[in-house]
Amino acid sequence: MVKSELKLADWWNELENGKVLCTLCPRYCKIGKGQSGFCFIRQNIDGKLYSAGYGRPTGFAVDPIEKKPLNHFFPGSSILSFGTAGCNLGCKFCQNWSMSKSRLDDLNAMNATPEQVVDLAIRRNVPSIAYTYNDPTIFGEYVIDISRIGRDKGIKSVMVTSGYIDKEARKDVYKYIDAANVDLKAFTETFYHKLTFSHLGSVLDTLAWLRHETDIWFEITTLLIPGENDSQEEIKKMCEWILNNLGDEIPLHFTAFHPDFKMRDKNPTPPSTLKSARSLALSMGIKYCYVGNVHDSEGQTTYCPECHTALIERDWHTVFRNKIQNGMCPECGAPIAGVGIS
Ligand code: SF4
């Protein structure tokens, strides 16, 4: 792509000697002329920062919304999904590294204007668009333009993200976002530092901001990796933090790891680990807790938190039945948290 086609980035400052400071995520890369930031797709050209991921998706798919995973946002609906190359985290266990660790040219990224992305969602007859596969924070300018046009045309927008984003930039990037799934990858700074090259505190800050300063519906996902973040003690601390800071109605998903990228020496997560994490979370008071990346109908079904009636029956990403009526349990009348759930 030639310079004239590139999108000038938001969220950066000029430094000395033609360097720039990217202020989009808490990595705050200082980028020299001709260089890219850690995420590959934000580039310094002649002393200005450009968003090379703008308008360059790496492919589209229509997924069940349960695959994001979102279980309380228009359950059973489909969602147009895409990402770009690059990522602002460096997870050694990345489950999607062929995209996140690629440069745009490696992936033969296509060209699509924001209008074309929204029109594709309309043509595919899906109610929403997911910015997913890699971390959409790094193509925030593209997210803003698509989600703004989508909102005008009745198409909702969903961020699937690590939540590692600067406090000021997130106000812009999430302005037209309707829902998010945020990875809470572990509950120790050691894990975040050593295995993701990022920091836990920034992610917790984003979660608290979403809960207390926006109307965005969000759910949380934790990929449980044997021996790294799956101890009952760590899960207990994570659930305590969620309950104390976000409340008991944010759905929590524990998903299974498979050996990949730079972490091939670990075994896949045993289903028993997922089940016991879910049991612990429920016993502590989290109202909606799920398991993912395994077949477990019980662990994927939504139950009424009051009378325990099975309300949305699922297996893997398939919804078999939804009994919720007007946002309530039809048996006891308890309200069920979510958006567009019945
Ligand atoms: S968005 Fe990319 S370039 Fe900007 S600070 Fe984060 S990793 Fe660095």
Image: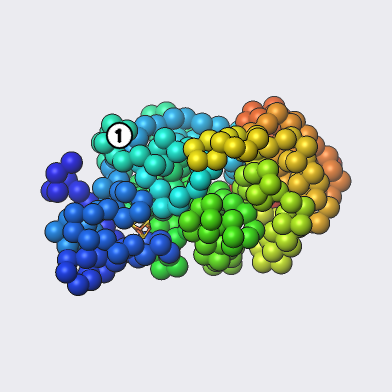
Q: Quadrant of residue 246?
A: bottom right
Where residue 30 appears, as percent x and y from the top left, is: 30, 64
Q: Nearer the viewer, residue 141 or 254?
A: 254
Q: Residues within 10 Å of mark 1 (few under 14, many from 20)?
A: few
Q: Nearer the viewer, residue 20 or 266?
A: 266
Where residue 5 appears, as percent x and y from the top left, is: 16, 45
Q: Which residue is at a point 65% across and 34% down the rendered structure image?
A: 268
Numbered-mark total: 1
Where residue 211 appears, as percent x and y from the top left, is: 59, 62
Q: Is residue 237 left or right of residue 91?
A: right
Q: Which residue is at a point 55% across and 40% down the rendered structure image?
A: 263
Res. 39 in view: yes
| Picture layout, residue 162 above or below residue 318 | below
Q: Nearer the viewer, residue 18 or 253?
A: 18
Where residue 146 appears, as percent x and y from the top left, is: 35, 46
- The residue that disc 1 covers is 106
Q: Residue furthest bottom?
A: 16
Q: Which residue is at a point 26% across and 61% down the rendered structure image?
A: 31
Q: Nearer the viewer, residue 4 or 213?
A: 4
Res. 82 in view: no
Q: Quadrant of residue 165?
A: bottom left
| Picture layout, residue 126 above or below residue 288 | above
Of the 4 image quadrants, the one containing the N terminus is top left
